[in-house]
Image (spheres, helix red, strand yellow):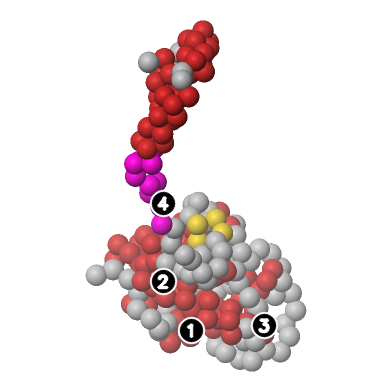
Amino acid sequence: RRADRVHDGQTMTDDDIQRAVDDLIALPTPYLDSLMQSRRTRINRLPPPIKAEVPMRKGDWFQTHTGVQFWPMDPRADEVRIDDIARGLAMQCRFNGHVKEFYSIAEHSVRVSHVVPPEHALWGLLHDAAEAYIGDMVRPLKTQMPAFRECEAAIMAVICERFGMTMPEPPEVKVADNVLLMTERRDLLLYQKPWTHRADPLPDEIEPWTWQKAEAEFLSRFAMLKKEAP
């Protein structure tokens, strides 16, 4: 019985354990063999452990601001968070940082959302949302990176799925984006080199926000647009 208690893991004192070991040693060899075989039979009858199935994902993941594991090469709509998008865009500077002062992608996006027709305002706000997950890339390089553009398009597709937008991007959004681009060129770049004329800039001068204000304005604009959505 003491030997059974040792095998079954019951709480025993040191003296109990020593006496149980002595009892086992004193058993006749045939009986001891029979006892051990009985224990092995009981163990072998236990059901196999259940292995959790880990879904295979393409590529690797990084941790977002809200703690989500996000796979850029295997994006999913249920892993998209508006707080992650707002923070990611608010902390990134337009023009790869080559501006007179910090000016975030989040602020750019809010401004685009006010220039497009109202029915496309949500698209205007989120047109650069994929950059929250993969970063911005200057246009001359981006045109030479088809794999990057494919990744960006896949992420944009799940963002559209998550927030109820329809692909592709409305052409009115690109028009508004170019209006802001030319306005930003005028107001934020130190030197005015010759550019391809894409649109007329806005009359009002841009006074850049802090990243904190840009994040707050982005989230506020998103909440307003989702509330107004039919």
Q: Which mark is residue 141?
A: 3
- State the image coordinates of residue 91 (x, y, percent, origin top left): 60, 60
Q: From mark 2 to mark 1, how far is it between C-alphas?
A: 20 Å
Query: Looking at the image, which residue is at 61% across and 72% down?
Result: 136
Disc 4 marks a residue whose amino acid type is Lys
Which residues, given as a range, are shown in magenta?
Answer: 43-53
Residue labelled with disc 1: 174
68 relative position to 225: left or right: right
**3D distance between C-alphas at marks 1 and 3:** 19 Å
Q: Which residue is mark 2?
A: 158
Closer to the chain start, of discs 1 and 4, is 4
* Disc number for residue 51: 4
Q: Is residue 176 magenta?
A: no
Mark 3 belongs to which amino acid?
Leu
Q: Nearer the viewer, mark 1 or mark 3?
A: 3
User: Quadrant where the C terminus lies?
Assistant: bottom left
Q: Nearer the viewer, mark 3 or mark 2?
A: 2
Amino acid identity at mark 2: Val
Q: Nearer the viewer, mark 1 or mark 4?
A: 4
Mark 2 and mark 1 lie on one chain; the one further toward the N terminus is: 2
Indicate which label's residue lies in the foreground, 4 or 2: 4
Residue shown at the point (56%, 64%) measured from the top left: 60
Q: CA distance from mark 1 to mark 4?
A: 49 Å
